[in-house]
C-alpha cells in the first residue's frame, strides 16, 4: 500500500515538474511575437489566418457532441443480460437527463439554426 502511494505521488509530480521546468527554460522564446506569425516564403502574410466564424455554429456543434456522447451511452443497453430494477432506474435517469437537456436547449433557443 505504501508503494502504491509513493508511485502515485511520483507519477503525478514528475510530469508536473517536467512541464514547469520546460516552461521556464523556454519561456523567453514564447515572448517573441514575430516567431508566432505565419511564414510565407519570407514575405508578409497576405491575409489574416484567423477567420472569424459564427458562435452560433460553435454552440450548436458543442451541443451536438454532448448529446451524441449521451446517446452513445444508451447503445449497450440491449446487451444487458440482467435487467433488474437498479439497471432500469439508471437507464431511465440517463434517458430523462437526455430528454430534460434537449427540452432545456430547445426552450433556450440554442437548437434553432435560424432566428
Image (tube, grey):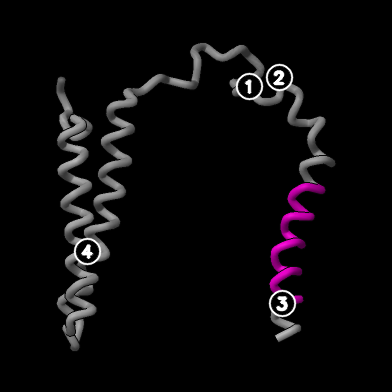
Most distant residue in the right direction: 25
Say which of marks 2 and 4 sits in front: 4
For the residue labelled by badge 1, is the local secondary structure a helix, a strand or a loop?
loop
Few, some or many residues within 10 Å of mark 2 (<14, 14–19, 20+): few
Secondary element at tag 4: helix
User: Residue 11 appears at what percent x and percent y?
Assistant: 71, 68
Of badges 1 and 4, nearer the viewer stands 4
Determine the residue positioned at 16% across, 37% down.
Answer: 106
- Of tags 2 and 3, the one toward the viewer is 3
Foreground mark, 1 or 3, reads 3
Asked whether the residues under the numbered discs 3 and 4 touch, taking CB atoms below 8 Å apart as contact, a structural biologist would say no
Mark 1–mark 3 Cα distance, whole angstroms, equals: 45 Å
Please tell me which residue is depicted at 29% across the width and 39% down the height of the picture.
61
Residue 93: give its label.
4
Nearer to me, 83 or 113:
83
C-alpha distance separating marks 2 and 4: 53 Å
Q: Is residue 16 magenta?
A: yes
Q: Disc 2, disc 3: CB below 8 Å?
A: no
The magenta stretch spans residue 89:
no
Disc 3 packing (10 Å; few <14; some 14–19; many ≥20): few
The magenta stretch is: 5-21
Instruction: Name the mark on residue 34.
Output: 2
Mark 3 or mark 4: whose residue is earlier in sequence: 3
| Residue where numbered disc 3 is placed | 5
Q: Hey, which quadrant is residue 90 in on the image?
A: bottom left
How many numbered circles does the render carry? 4
Find residue 17 and report its horizontal and vertical position in percent: 79, 55
Q: Name the residue tied to disc 1.
A: 37
Precedes in sequence: disc 1 or disc 4: 1
Q: Residue at x 21, y 54 (%)?
A: 98
Amino acid at each position: 500500500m505504501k508503494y502504491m502511494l509513493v508511485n502515485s505521488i511520483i507519477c503525478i509530480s514528475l510530469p508536473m515538474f517536467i512541464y514547469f521546468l520546460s516552461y521556464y527554460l523556454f519561456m523567453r522564446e514564447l515572448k517573441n511575437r514575430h516567431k508566432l506569425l505565419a511564414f510565407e516564403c519570407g514575405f508578409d502574410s497576405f491575409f489574416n489566418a484567423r477567420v472569424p466564424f459564427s458562435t452560433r455554429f460553435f454552440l450548436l456543434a458543442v451541443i451536438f457532441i454532448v448529446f451524441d456522447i449521451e446517446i452513445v451511452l444508451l447503445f449497450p443497453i440491449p446487451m444487458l443480460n440482467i435487467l433488474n430494477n437498479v439497471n432500469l432506474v439508471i437507464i431511465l435517469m440517463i434517458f430523462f437527463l437526455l430528454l430534460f437537456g434537449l427540452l432545456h436547449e430547445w426552450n433556450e433557443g440554442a437548437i434553432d439554426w435560424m432566428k
